[in-house]
Image (cartoon, rainbow, N blue to C red):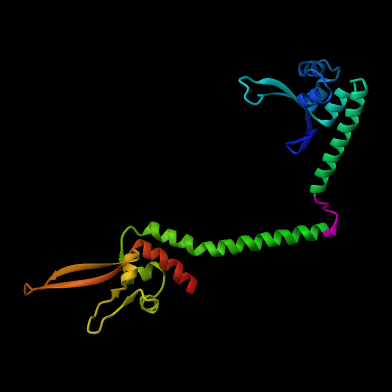
Amino acid sequence: MELVHIIDGEPKADSLTVADVFGKDHGKVLRDIKALECSDEFREANFGFSTYRPENGKRDYPLCQMTRDGFTFLVMGFTGAKAAEWKEKYIAAFNEMEARLRGQQPDLNNPAQLRGLLLDYSERVLSLEADLSEARPKVEALERIALADKSMCITDAAKTLQMRPKDLFAWLQRHKWVYRRAGVAHWIGYQDKIQQGLLEHKVTEITRSDGRADIHEQVRVTPKGLARLAEKVKEAA
């Protein structure tokens, strides 16, 4: 059985455990606590009443959490061989727990510990900066998705990506997003990029002044494609 528990960073014992280890009725232990002849200030500082519910229970029962001083004040009034044995064990348990807590606190007057803390802090900062650097292209990509609710021409996509259109066209051609057929003036998107939803073709019928119809085909960047470009082009930069 765990004799001492850490609650809010402080070692404490509860009345139910005290009753178990000392072989007493829990109700009697609670009555003993309430009957202690101590000041109101001591009682308020060292005893806290709450409730607990047993496993598979249907109602709550009273419980008292006590500090080391409260526990000592209570059990030092218990008598008998068993009481004496458990008094020693409880005192040892509290001392061990407090030593463990003290060991977790750095000694700010110790240069070696301070150096260790600074190194640990520096490593954490560098790690966070690396995570932010890795995530930044994705964040910018998401921002551009939010701003783009429909496809756009490559020139407008370049403006959104804050780069020159000719540089974006060169990047798209180099990375096999777009190409030109011999004898065809307009750009064409690679089929795999279209299937992935990164590019689309827009076909527009234009009527000339003489009444003839011209078909104008344009490759356009989708919001998904713009997000991918924001990430990829940023990585390349």
Task: Please give left or right for residue 140 compared with residue 176 in the image.
Answer: right
- Which of the 4 image quadrants contains residue 52? top right
Of the pair 91 and 225, the residue shown nearer to us? 91
Image position of 55 with respect to 202: above or below:
above
Asked if residue 156 can be seen in this view, the reply is no
Image position of 209 with respect to 117: above or below:
below
| Total numbered circles | 0
- Magenta residues span 106-112
Rendering coords of residue 214 (x, y %) = 14, 73
Of the pair 83 and 119, the residue shown nearer to us? 83
The prevailing secondary structure element of the residues shown in magenta is loop
- Which of the 4 image quadrants contains residue 131? bottom right
For the N terminus, which image quadrant?
A: top right
Picture residue at 75% right of the left edge, 39% below the top? 9
Q: Is residue 236 magenta?
A: no
Rendering coords of residue 98 (x, y %) = 83, 40
Task: Please give left or right for residue 162 compared with residue 130 in the image.
Answer: left
Image position of 127 with respect to 219: above or below:
above
Asked if residue 146 can be seen in this view, the reply is yes
Rendering coords of residue 13 (x, y %) = 79, 30
- Which of the 4 image quadrants contains residue 218? bottom left
Task: Please give left or right for residue 12 compared with residue 230 in the image.
Answer: right
